[in-house]
Amino acid sequence: MTTLLQRIAQSPSFRSFIIGVIVFAGVLVGVETSPAMVQQHGSLLKALDHLVLGIFIAEIVVKVGAEGRQPWRYFKDPWNVFDFLVVAACFLPMSAQYVTVLRLARLLRVLRLVHVLPKLQLLVSALLKSIPSMAYVTMLLGLLFYVYGVAGTFLFAGNDPVHFGTLALSLLTLFRVVTLEGWTELLYTQMYGCDRFGYADTPALCTQPSAMPVVAVVFFCTFILLGTMIILNLFIGVIMNALQEAHEEAQEQEQARAEAAGTARTLDEDIVALEQQLSAMQEQLARLRGKVGRQAPPTTEPEPPRLRSA
């Protein structure tokens, strides 16, 4: 039974079937966002959702059963734990007010594609590996934001209170600038003053207009060069490096599995060869015993000694 379950769990057809069910589950959740579809085909959608849930439960049973007498090995894989939690979340006792949480839990089924598709799993592994290095890059970016945020508040708070009135607003504005979203409007407001640009619809907020063309150009251009052109590209470099490492590790693991499978096949072949040799030796020994039995002279019992008569 365990061997059969292992064959099913490792079968490419079974994996392709699960991928199709996951995609179907994602489409099903998308259809349920339409109130009209839910009203017209609510019972059918509910039945299909139960069918998908049943298939996922059967998948877990197959994979756990494939572990044989050590079913806990199924939970050693973090992706299997994620799959189990996604399925278990659908059985949580929730009232009507938490139905949105239940729908979001069902939406997590789509993320199972990351598990069943090796390439997506490789990308996620690369992102997880890059987290330690990205933390230092994030720290550097945070320092840059803080320095420029404080400077922007001191320089532009009076002229542009909407975007630089407080430190929190300055940091939010810098996040907008680092993504290159409408940063030229912010630049022109500081260059020409709020009375001439940027506050035409809200002139009451422009209480202290101040034009700073040189300071504004230096501030925004240096921040974009440091934040967007350099530090954000460091994130890309870190991710690419982690992706390369994850790819190499995946190749090493695949090679190790191939070598282990080759070693197992070699051992099986050696065992079969030894069994054949042993069988041949037993047959030869049986023939030799038969020959020895035919060539041996018949054994006669010695006659008892006769007594002489007196």
Image (spheres, rainbow, N blue to C red):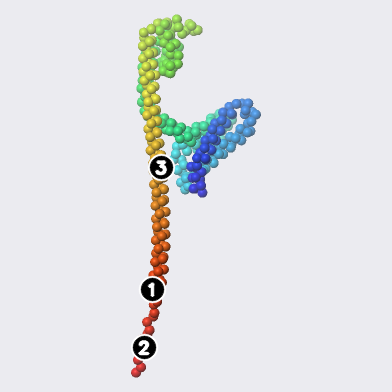
For the point 41% across and 72% down, which residue is it?
294
Q: Which residue is drawn at 37% across and 17% down?
A: 225
Q: Residue at x 36, y 9 (%)?
A: 215
Secondary element at tag 1: loop
- Name the residue type under label 2: Arg
- In this view, the residue in front, 107 or 16, is 16
Rendering coords of residue 169 (x, y %): 43, 15
The answer to whether the residues at label 1 and label 3 have Cβ atoms under 8 Å apart is no
- Marks 1 and 3, how far apart at CA: 57 Å
Q: Which of 245 and 217 is in front in this view?
A: 245
**Which of the 4 image quarters holds residue 166?**
top left
Real-space Cα distance between discs 3 and 2? 83 Å
Q: Which residue carries the number 3 mark? A: 258
Q: Mark 2 points at which residue?
A: 306
Residue 177 pos. (x, y %): 42, 16
Q: What x and y, as percent, mark residue 123?
A: 43, 31
Residue that numbered label 1 is attached to? 296
Which of the two discs, 1 and 3, labels the residue nearer the N terminus? 3
